[in-house]
Image (cartoon, rainbow, N blue to C red):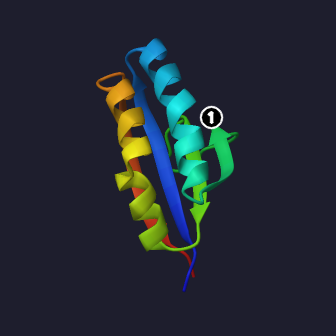
Amino acid sequence: MSKAYWVSTYRAVKNADKVAAYAKLAGPALSAAGGRFLARGAPSMVYELGLKERTVLIEFDSVAHATAAHDSPAYQLALDALGDGADRDIRIIEGL
């Protein structure tokens, strides 16, 4: 079974308070679901058409674990807290 990587980029933060409320709930929810935070923050460098937007990288044991973490009740509460506070792109990618 290959590891999986959750890649989240923040295209726009519309409400910093909502993002903070989300982060307070999301971090523990994803960690409890087996996620291991590998990186988060603004990129140190971008190339080609890269955008300098906040990025979060989380490792899971599998795509199924990452998907279950996203769909968990605890993470759904975090999404409710975020609401329309940010425009994001989340991808779950299977490792090699």
Q: In the picture shown, does residue 76 fall above or below 93?
A: above
Q: Which one is in front, 79 or 42?
A: 79
Q: In which quarter of the view is residue 60 placed?
A: bottom right
Comparing 80 with 54, the one in front is 80
Mark 1 residue type: Ala
Q: Residue at x 41, y 57 (%)?
A: 91
Percent from the top left, x then y, of residue 24?
A: 56, 28
Mark 1 nearby-residue class (10 Å; few <14, some 14–19, many ≥20): some
Residue drawn at x 47%, y 42% is 9
The quarter of the displayed image where residue 34 is located: bottom right
Q: Is residue 84 left or right of residue 29?
A: left
Check disc 1 and report its element: helix, strand or loop.
loop
Residue 55 higher or lower than 7, as above or below? above
Q: Quadrant of the C terminus?
A: bottom right
Q: For mark 1, what is the residue?
A: 42
Indicate left or right for 72 with 25 as reference. left
At 50% from the left and 57% from the top, the residue drawn is 6
Q: Is residue 49 visible to the viewer in this orientation of the structure?
A: no
> Which quadrant of the view contains residue 86?
top left
Q: Residue furthest left?
A: 84
Residue 94 locus on image (x, y percent): 48, 74
Q: Nearer the viewer, residue 59 or 88?
A: 59
Quarter of the rendering occupied by the N terminus:
bottom right
**Is residue 10 visible to the viewer in this orientation of the structure?**
yes
In the image, residue 49 above or below residue 35: above
